[in-house]
Amino acid sequence: MINSSISILCFTIFSFFVALSSEIYLTYFLPLIFLNLIKFRYFFEILKRLFFLNFFIILVIISVLLSDNSHLALLIFIRSNLIILFGLLLFHKMDSYGIASGISSLGLGSKISYLFYFCIRFIQIGKRDFYKLKCTLKIRAFKHETSIFTYQTYANLVAMLFLSAFKKSQMLEKTMQARGFNGKFYKFEDKIKLGFYDILLMILVLISVIFKQGIII
């Protein structure tokens, strides 16, 4: 629905200004409200992913609270959630090729485009392999305990993931060489086509970072 190039550009601008902001403004929520309206059917799915990602943010918040700086802790929490939620709303249901194609359309170069594409693909493959190994452990009635056997099992699992990724990278290299890969990222469209939603999102992002109104914190 939203052009991948516009999504990457808007995410970069929004994240940069929000991350460096010392205050939270109401205008920061304008692009989030707009994306929620056009992707309302996926709202609870996105909210669930945001909830699990907050476990990492909470660890940072706790470390800041220990230094008796509650204002900074709250600021970090809101800023982090604004950026993560904006990214989840933008790139939800977008595949790795779409993101790589968007980077290429922005004129960042073919090397960055296909490197980004392969990185995303290997993350997806690694995630798939991890779930396979996890299911294998469940079938074999593996139990999480504080023991040497448990630590050895986790170490073997991580080692198998690394070995699998290394083997697949070698296979991919040989496959690309056999197909005459020359380092160029090919796509169907060279020009960025802007739709109504793309233009409206760009306007809302620019309004949110330029006209900072309504201080929340």
Image (spheres, rainbow, N blue to C red):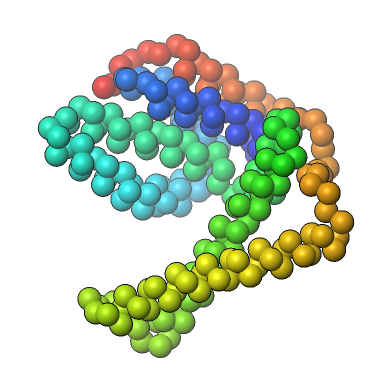
Which residue corresponds to the image point at 38% horizontal and 73% vertical from the top-left? 154
- Is residue 181 positioned above or below 70 on the image? below
In the image, 56: left or right of 2?
Answer: left
- Residue 40 screen position, x and y as percent: 50, 42
- Residue 200 screen position, x and y as percent: 60, 23
- Residue 164 screen position, x and y as percent: 58, 71
**From this viewpoint, is residue 136 visible?**
yes
- Hey, which residue is sitting farthest bottom in the picture? 140
Occupied quadrant, residue 180: bottom right
Quadrant position of the N terminus in the picture:
top right
Which residue corresponds to the image point at 37% horizontal and 21% vertical from the top-left? 21
**From this viewpoint, is residue 3 visible?**
no
Which residue corresponds to the image point at 24% horizontal and 32% vertical from the top-left? 74
- Is residue 60 positioned above or below 13 on the image? below
Quadrant position of the C terminus in the picture:
top left
- Is residue 71 positioned above or below 53 on the image? above
In the image, 135: left or right of 115?
Answer: left
The one of 216 and 125 positioned closer to us in this rendering: 125
- Is residue 198 positioned above or below 137 on the image? above
Which residue corresponds to the image point at 45% horizontal and 52% vertical from the top-left? 45
- Hey, which residue is sitting farthest right in the picture? 180
- Residue 52 screen position, x and y as percent: 36, 53
